[in-house]
Image (cartoon, rainbow, N blue to C red):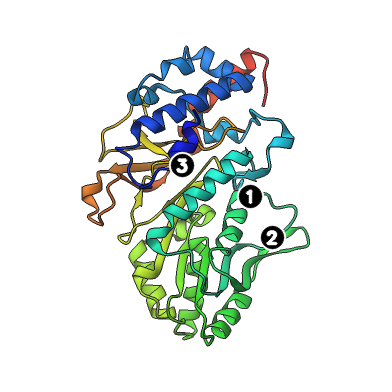
């Protein structure tokens, strides 16, 4: 049986308790596929003494060996030939290295099901045309990053009347054009159609701050939405708290906090975590989140800070069913939110340095080298 399909067709996208068995079986099914079709992944599991058959119930998933994102930035490992990897997505590569994830037809169709269900509570898909301001990369054939594909994909949530990009490709590199963005905001704020902002919070903040300092305040049309995602990346020192961002949006654009939507995701884990009305990232049925102790890597109870371990059976072309990020986070009980969504929610605290997750990555690398396999 195709348990992955059953999971992605689950009626309630946040019924993580009721979908436990389906998730477990989908993970086991995916693990068996990876074990059979990816020699590097099979070697890692063998060295760790783990077999797909060891996944007998939901609690066994905590013992499934994970791949750190830093490991995936140094190795290319796939479970399907290139002609079946219809989409190639890479991480941003801000450190000079990037992960490359291949996605096959099945993961794309299931991803579409996920997208439609997860965005429904925030009413992001609409037949009403919009003007788009994308605080991200203008498409270019050299840019394969997942964040660029995602930002462009978001502009198809409604019919796009226009697309203005903050980062434009020129002379072999991307350069910010915030002045052009400000002109577009002022122009389209006079339209009868809504506007949607998409992309990096840092560039969104820098642009709105420039407008505020110049006294350029506008009133965006009704039902305009500010969509933030992708993190602050190299601008982490300039990062402001969420309330400061909401206040700036209200002051400069006259858009209420309820129309600011945030998302979280990773190239190595293409599950969309879309915030609720209280701006919390509830875990959808398509994934599970475990928080692990930074020293022992043991799974921690809810409410504790640790490394964020993300799981999903969504992709078969690349063995990313369990990855360890370099994010520090807390998993909270649903009741702490109070929005009505019944799954736990993830709070991202920040990132650890690469040296802090080096041990995890080195272990996987050494296993591959020992077996004479390289990604």
Is the residue 228 above or below the residue 314 in the image?
Answer: below
* Residue pointed to by mark 1: 145
Label 1 crowd (10 A; few <14 / some 14-19 / many >=20): many
Q: CA distance from mark 2 to mark 3?
A: 29 Å
Q: Which mark is residue 19?
A: none
Q: CA distance from mark 1 to mark 3?
A: 25 Å
* Residue pointed to by mark 3: 8
Residue plotted at (40% across, 76% down): 255
Comes first in the chain, label 2 or label 3: 3
Side of 207 relative to 281 (left or right): right
Q: Are marks 2 and 1 in contact (CB under 8 Å)?
A: no
Between circles 2 and 3, the one closer to the viewer is 3
Label 3 crowd (10 A; few <14 / some 14-19 / many >=20): many
Residue plotted at (73% across, 58% down): 140
Where is residue 314? Give x, y as percent. 51, 38
Is the residue 101 above or below the residue 64 in the image?
Answer: below
Question: Which of the 4 quarters of the picture holds residue 365?
Answer: top right
Q: Are marks 1 and 3 in contact (CB under 8 Å)?
A: no
Where is residue 116? Give x, y as percent. 47, 55
Label 2 crowd (10 A; few <14 / some 14-19 / many >=20): some
Where is residue 107? Give x, y as percent. 57, 40
Residue plotted at (68% across, 15% down): 372
Residue plotted at (45% across, 70% down): 225
Side of 128 relative to 285 (left or right): right
Screen quadrant of the C terminus: top right
Where is residue 351? Give x, y as percent. 44, 44
Q: Are marks 2 and 3 in contact (CB under 8 Å)?
A: no
Is the residue 168 above or below the residue 235 in the image?
Answer: below
* Residue pointed to by mark 2: 139
């Amino acid at each position: 049986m195709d348990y992955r399909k059953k999971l992605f067709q689950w009626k309630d996208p946040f019924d993580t308790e009721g979908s436990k068995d389906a998730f477990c079986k989908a993970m086991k099914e995916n693990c068996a596929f990876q074990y059979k079709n990816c020699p590097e992944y099979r070697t890692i599991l063998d060295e760790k003494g783990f077999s797909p058959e060891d996944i007998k119930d939901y609690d066994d998933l905590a013992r499934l060996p994970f791949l750190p994102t830093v490991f995936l930035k140094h190795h290319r490992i796939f479970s399907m030939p290139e002609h079946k990897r219809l989409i190639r997505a890479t991480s941003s590569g801000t450190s000079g290295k990037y992960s490359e994830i291949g996605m096959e037809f099945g993961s794309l169709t299931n991803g579409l099901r996920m997208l439609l269900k997860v965005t429904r509570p925030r009413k992001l898909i609409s037949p009403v045309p919009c003007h788009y301001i994308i605080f991200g990369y203008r498409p270019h054939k050299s840019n394969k990053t997942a964040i660029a594909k995602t930002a462009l994909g978001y502009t198809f949530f409604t019919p796009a009347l226009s697309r203005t990009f903050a980062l434009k490709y020129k002379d072999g590199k991307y350069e910010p054009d915030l002045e052009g963005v400000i002109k577009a905001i002022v122009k389209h704020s006079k339209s009868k159609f809504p506007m949607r902002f998409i992309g990096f919070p840092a560039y969104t903040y820098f642009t709105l701050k420039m407008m505020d300092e110049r006294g350029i305040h506008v009133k965006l049309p009704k039902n305009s939405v500010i969509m933030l995602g992708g993190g602050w990346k190299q601008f982490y020192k300039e990062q402001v708290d969420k309330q400061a961002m909401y206040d700036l949006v209200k002051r400069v654009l006259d858009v209420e906090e309820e129309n600011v939507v945030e998302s979280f995701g990773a190239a190595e884990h293409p599950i969309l975590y879309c915030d609720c009305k209280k701006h919390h990232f509830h875990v959808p049925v398509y994934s599970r989140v475990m928080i692990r102790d930074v020293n022992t890597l043991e799974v921690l109870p809810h409410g504790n800070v640790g490394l964020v371990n993300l799981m999903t059976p969504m992709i078969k072309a690349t063995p990313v069913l369990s990855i360890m990020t370099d994010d520090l986070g807390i998993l909270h009980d649903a009741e702490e939110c109070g929005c009505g969504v019944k799954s736990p929610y993830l709070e991202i605290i920040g990132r650890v340095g690469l040296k802090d997750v080096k041990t995890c990555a080195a272990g996987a690398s050494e296993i591959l080298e020992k077996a004479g396999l390289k990604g």
